[in-house]
Image (cartoon, rainbow, N blue to C red):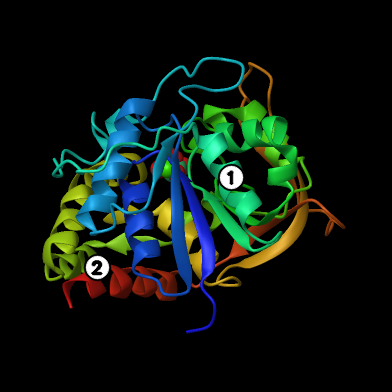
Amino acid sequence: MADRTPLVIDTDPGIDDALAILLALASPEVDLQLVTTVHGNVELAQVTENALRVLHLAGRSDVPVAAGAAGPLVHPLPERAGHVHGAAGLGGVELPPSPVPVDPRPAVVALAELLLAHEPGTVTVAPIGPLTNLALLLHVFPEAAARIGRVVWMGGSATRGGNVTAAAEFNAWADPEAAAAVLGSGLPVTMVGLDVTLPTVLTQAGIERFRGAGTVGAAAAGFLRQYVDAARDRYGIDGVCVHDALALTEAIVPGTLGTVRREVVVGTTLGAARGQTLVDRRTVAEHGVAVAETVDSEAAVEFLVSRVCSYGD
Ligand code: RIB
Ligand code: CA
């Protein structure tokens, strides 16, 4: 196997976050070396506990989990997403607790230390929640942030409007000031937004395949039951959009998604457009953000299902 890409996942588990973590751990292309947690779907303490338990489920409690920001940079979050992910964040599934405690370092310290220990440009950071931790890293440890090889963010939307409001996707909406800071930082960001995640639906047939994949697969199928109900209620589809897992697919296999470099600004007012990612599709930008605009959804779903099912081998 060619050198594995050192990977950090910054996450707010969350059902699709959990799948994304399981996908990364089943992928030989990457070496998950750190999980940092951030407020988002549910409260920080809960997402941190969930991250520990998902890693333990996969037999990888050796991967350190460091807790990060408990809230957004500036304005409080009006609501979280317990109605989508379940009050405890994993669709009502109670996983066994991990024997390993949370890493005592704050997330930004753990991330900075990891980045400073690797050659510049070699580490991929995949934030699949609000960008609060990454924005803090930029301000507290800019010399470490500058060493990031690639940021693959699940968030935003160019043409599909929002999912938490008509204008805003949840991860951008949960901390618009952080999203503005990161997208405007000059870091090499790939934005994996609703434009490519909404068409990428994991159907019941795919979920059923998980059931044959041992303990991990059965848990994944369990997580998804609530998510399917929420997707049916919200989008009227018979399946789930595993947003974060698609972002990790791009992190694991760069180029999975078709991207175009665009200028992106984030709505940071307190009005109706708060959290909107305004993507300028009139021109191809010289710098800006690599915005994912095309996807082979069928191939992406098969990649996810086959990899998660590999736990049962
Ligand atoms: O809009 C989808 C995003 O919001 C995903 O990261 C999901 O986990 C939720 O946090
Ligand atoms: Ca998430």
The residue indicated by pointer 2 is 206
Q: Residue at x 55, y 30 (%)?
A: 173
Q: Which of marks 2 and 1 is in front?
A: 1
Question: Going by the image, does 15 lie left or right of 159?
Answer: left
Residue 168 visible: no
| Relative vertical location of residue 222 with respect to residue 23 in this rendering, above or below | above
Residue 182 visible: yes
Question: Going by the image, does 50 lie left or right of 190?
Answer: left
The amino acid sitting under disc 2 is Gly
Q: Which quarter is ligand 1 in?
A: top left
Front position in the image: 14 or 59: 59
Question: Going by the image, does 7 lie left or right of 37?
Answer: right
- The residues bearing labels 2 and 1 have C-alpha atoms spaced at a distance of 39 Å
Q: Which residue is drawn at 35% across and 68% down?
A: 304
Q: Residue at x 48, y 40 (%)?
A: 129
| Relative vertical location of residue 13 with respect to residue 177 in this rendering, above or below | below
Find residue 113 and name its label. 1
Instruction: Give residue 136's position: percent from left, percent from top.
Output: 63, 30
Identify the element where label 1 is drawn. helix
Q: Quadrant of residue 284?
A: bottom right
Residues marked 2 and 1 touching at CB (< 8 Å): no
Find residue 36 and name its label. none
